[in-house]
């Protein structure tokens, strides 16, 4: 813990943080059991790369049925990241490829440094995404770009990655973790119900028909503003005790 921020580090640098079953289970367990004092989380990778994706040495041992269950186990783990109790910021550097990109896509904010590069080598390895990538990656960059990446093995560098929507922040090499921590610490000071609305309600509203979305929004809005914390924050502004919005 860094204050109210849980910092989760992928620690298999010798294998470029390739995600084997043990690491996927550990991710699931960490995000299903975050300490109650956690208000935000950061994921980052040790060594030269964020994550090399699926541990390919385990792939060759699976038949079709086992492969399906394996994919479902990734869904559980990455859903625990995306739909857990707190917003998650991913700090990206070096390879963000295959399952590593799927993991990054399950977080809520991605901060990349200039060394980051993005690819989905599943296409060229004769396989397919299995960690939720076909659902989440098109929401970031669009179906056409993902199709191109998988059909042609296209690699996006850090600049292009920020432009097309993989990362919301692009920072100098070596500073992604510091920036992610700074953002997570800021997020941790938000009212918890606001953070819940943004991580649980907004993604669902975005997928609802507009008429349903307006109703869900109204319900979430009413619940959030009824919380004592919201009333105290609005009162602080009206009393001149809260920060104004500053020009960027
Ligand atoms: C691995 C893996 C891995 C590295 N599984 N062992 N992912 C990929 O297809 C990406 C494969 N990896 C790479 O392209 C490169 O390793 C990197 C660009 C990420 C890094 O390159 P580099 O030069 O820094 O490292 P390296 O020398 O290639 O790898 C160091 C060691 O890590 C080496 O093992 P060693 O025992 O020879 O030292 C590599 O074999 C090992 N390693 N990546 C297993 N991925 C839920 S479905 C998701 C489907 C996918 O993710 S498919 C995409 C898989």
Image (cartoon, helix red, strand yellow):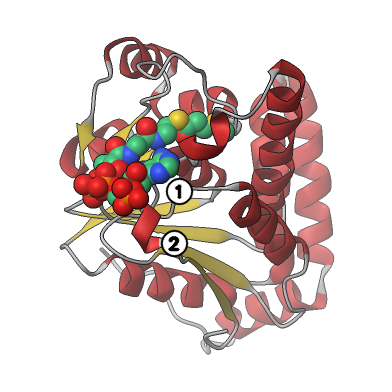
**In screen coordinates, is 2 left or right of 159?**
right
Please report the residue visible at 50 percent of the width from the left and 28 percent of the height from the top.
139
Q: Secondary structure at mark 1?
A: loop
* Any part of residue 194 in sight: no
Quadrant of the rendering where the C terminus is positioned:
bottom left
47 or 165: nearer the viewer: 47
- Residue under label 2, please give it: 12
Contact, CB < 8 Å: mark 1 with mark 2? yes
Residue lying at 76% horizontally and 63% vertically, measured from the top left = 225
- Neighbor class of circle 1 (other Cα within 10 Å; few <14, some 14-19, many 20+) is many
* Position above or below: 216 against 25: above
The quarter of the rendering in which ligand 1 is drawn is: top left
Coordinates of residue 44 in the picture (x, y in percent): 43, 63
Q: Residue at x 51, y 84 (%)?
A: 242
Ligand 1 has an atom within 8 Å of the beta carbon of the residue at disc 1: yes
For numbered disc 2, what is the local secondary structure? loop
If you read the primary sequence from the N terminus, does the residue marked by circle 1 or circle 2 appear first? Answer: 2
Is the residue 66 above or below the residue 183 in the image? above
Rendered image: mark on residue 89: none
Q: Is residue 3 visible?
A: yes
Question: Which quarter of the picture shows residue 86?
Answer: bottom right
Q: Which residue is mark 1?
A: 18
Locate residue 168, reporting x and y percent.
35, 48
Asked which quadrant contains residue 146, the reply is top left
Going 29% across and 31% down the picture, which residue do you hit? Answer: 164
* Callout 2 crowding tier (Cα within 10 Å): few <14, some 14–19, many ≥20: some
Closer-to-camera residue (93/127): 127
> Which quarter of the rendering shows the N terminus?
bottom right
């Amino acid at each position: 813990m860094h204050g109210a921020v849980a910092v989760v580090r992928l620690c298999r640098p010798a294998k470029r943080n390739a995600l084997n079953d043990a690491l996927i289970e550990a991710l699931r367990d960490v995000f299903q059991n975050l300490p109650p004092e956690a208000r935000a989380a950061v994921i980052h990778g040790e060594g030269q790369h964020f994550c090399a994706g699926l541990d390919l040495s385990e792939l060759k041992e699976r038949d079709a049925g086992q492969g399906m269950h394996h994919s479902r186990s990734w869904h559980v783990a990455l859903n625990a990241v995306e739909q857990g109790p707190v917003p998650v910021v991913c700090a990206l550097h070096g390879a963000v490829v295959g399952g590593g990109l799927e993991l990054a896509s399950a977080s809520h904010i991605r901060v990349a440094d200039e060394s980051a590069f993005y690819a989905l080598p599943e296409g060229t390895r004769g396989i397919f995404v299995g960690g939720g990538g076909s659902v989440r990656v098109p929401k970031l960059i669009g179906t056409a770009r993902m199709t191109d990446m998988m059909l042609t093995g296209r690699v996006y560098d850090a600049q292009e990655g920020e432009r097309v929507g993989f990362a919301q922040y692009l920072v100098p090499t070596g500073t992604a973790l510091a920036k992610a921590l700074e953002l997570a610490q800021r997020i941790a000071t938000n009212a918890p119900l606001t953070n819940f609305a943004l991580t649980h309600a907004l993604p669902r509203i975005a997928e609802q028909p507009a008429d349903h979305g307006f109703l869900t929004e109204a319900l979430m809005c009413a619940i959030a503003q009824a919380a004592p914390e919201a009333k105290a924050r609005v009162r602080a502004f009206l009393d001149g005790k809260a920060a104004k919005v500053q020009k960027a």
